[in-house]
Image: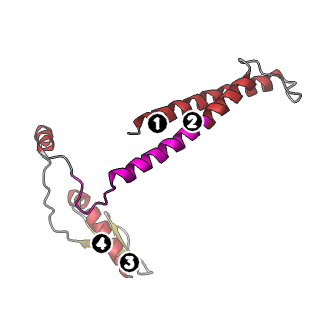
Amino acid sequence: MINQQLTGLLLLLATAGAAQAQSEVYLCVDEHGKREYKNTGLTKGCKKVDLPGITMIPAPPKKAAAQTAAAKPAASTPQDFPKVDNGTQKTRDNDRKQILLDEMKAEEQKLSNLKKDYNNGEPERRGDERNYAKYQERVAGMKEDIDRTEKNIEALKREIGNIK
């Protein structure tokens, strides 16, 4: 029951701006005691609710907002924020770099194998590919795999380059 009342109150507060514009809000209670706020009181068991006026604070003009944003100092790190010493961070960065290098080596090996199987767009036909369309579909899939692997390698190189 308390959850329903709290939900109703939150709904009322959330819709208060719209309710002010519509100027009428009704509290409806059904035969099971469930409360519901509506903007029409046409159903049985609804009572009009008087809402206090809402004070709206106008937004500053865009020009002033840009000036105040530029005048604010840059956000600083809170004093109680955990800090890591340089040696620990360097170790973490080295571990991350090694993981990325290992991933890149695996991707490069995968790319080499894919290109070997692809055979410049003319891989060997398999016995289950009597239909030429199936062969073309497999070749297109191989090309997509090669492109995806090349993009993965590029992304890994960028990540490695971003490590301090």
Relative to 53, does residue 1 appear above or below in the rendering? below
Q: Position of residue 21 (x, y in %)?
A: 21, 56
Distance Cα–Cα, label 2 vs label 1 = 10 Å
Amino acid bearing label 3:
Asn
User: For the residue labelled by badge 1, is the local secondary structure a helix, a strand or a loop?
Assistant: helix
Q: What kind of element bears circle 3?
A: helix
Residue 8: x %, y % from top left: 33, 72
Instruction: Determine the CA span between mark 4 and mark 2.
Output: 56 Å
Residue at the front extreme, as displayed: 87
Left or right, 89 with respect to 79, comes to: right
> Do the residues bearing badges 2 and 3 touch, measured as CB atoms within 8 Å?
no
**Magenta part mainly helix, strand or loop?**
helix
Per the model, the C-alpha gap separating discs 1 and 3 is 52 Å
Instruction: Write down the residue under mark 3.
Output: 3
Give the class, few, some or many, for how many residues have Cα within 10 Å of label 4's Cα (few <14, many ≥20).
Answer: some
Instruction: Please say if the residues under marks 1 and 4 sit with CB atoms less than 8 Å apart.
Output: no
Marked residue nearer the N-terminal end (4 or 2): 4
Looking at marks 4 and 3 on the same chain, the residue that comes earlier in the sequence is marked by: 3
> What is the three-letter code of the residue carrying label 4?
Leu
Check the picture and name the quadrant holding the C terminus: top left
Q: Earlier in the sequence, mark 2 or mark 1?
A: 2
- Give above or below for 82 relative to 6: above
Residues at marks 4 and 3 touching, judged by CB atoms closer than 8 Å: no
Q: Quote the CA–CA distance across marks 4 and 3.
A: 10 Å
Residue 9 marker: 4
| Label 2 to label 3: alpha-carbon separation | 54 Å
Q: Position of residue 78 (x, y in %)?
A: 23, 58
- Badges 2 and 1: C-beta atoms under 8 Å apart? yes
Marks 1, 4: nearer the viewer: 1
| Of the pair 62 and 103, the residue shown nearer to us | 103
Which residue is label 1 attached to? 160
- Look at mark 2 in the image and give the residue it sits on: 104
